[in-house]
Amino acid sequence: MLLPRMARLLWQLKRTATGITRVFDMGEACSPTSSLCEWTEGRAVIIVLDAMGYDAIHVNGYLNENAREKLAENYLHAVLVHAEQSYTDDVLQFGAHPLPNRVHIPIQTSLPPHPDTLTFPLPVLSAGQIGRVVLTRDEGQPVSQFTLFDLPADVLPEPTIMATIDFVMDEARYFQKVKERQAKLN
């Protein structure tokens, strides 16, 4: 599985980052061809991303209102970002809007000396990639810098994330069996 290895890389990048760090999922983390995503309406991947330490998870397009409510009942740490919900804290506001072949990110920052809105396109990341955006000021103007990190082949999986995935997969299989039994009875 890719996510346990991605977790290890993500945690390494967070440890070496300077300044305020936020981790955002840009969307499409749940493949439409994945049984796990289908059985849980996308909730399983959200639970894993939350365990990986994401601050906000972009859920436009695949997580319906019913699934969002079920996740809210589970006390996620991450904010579920969608058309009606953005991530906001004392430093920035983040909302993601998908466009063809890229993700368009409006970010409201509180970089000193005054707030600004930065809007910039990012490339769509492939499986096994993490992008980092660094926001700074240059001569008073906000500047963004994007760096792409590919998952090295030698990165070992993070055991706690592997266990989280095993847990949600077992839950998904159980509820899928229950659903199939109910369908046979009807």
Image (spheres, rainbow, N blue to C red):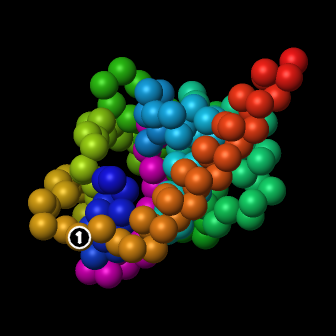
User: For mark 1, does the 10 Å Cα neighbourhood hold few (<14), some (14 to 19), or many (20 or more) residues?
Assistant: few
Whether residue 145 sits left or right of residue 33 in the image: it is left
User: Start and end of the magenta stretch?
Assistant: 14-28
Whether residue 134 sits left or right of residue 172 in the image: it is left
Q: In front here: 24 or 160?
A: 160
Please say whether residue 175 is one of the residues in the magenta stretch: no
- Count the marks: how many? 1
Q: In front here: 25 or 88?
A: 25
Q: Residue furthest left?
A: 153
Rendered residue at 33%/53% (across/down): 1
Residue marked by disc 1 = 156
Whether residue 42 sits left or right of residue 68 in the image: it is left
Q: Is most of the magenta stretch helix, strand or loop?
A: loop
Q: Position of residue 95 (x, y in %)?
A: 54, 44
Q: Position of residue 172 (x, y in %)?
A: 62, 46
Instruction: Classify mark 1: helix, strand or loop.
Output: loop
Q: Amino acid at mark 1?
A: Leu
Q: Residue furthest top?
A: 186
Rendered residue at 80%/56% (across/down): 73
Q: Quadrant of the C terminus?
A: top right
Q: Is residue 176 above or below residue 141?
A: above
Q: Is residue 114 visible?
A: no
Q: In front here: 75 or 38?
A: 38
User: Toward which corner of the image does residue 40 lie, by quadrant?
Assistant: top right
Rendered residue at 75%/60% (across/down): 74
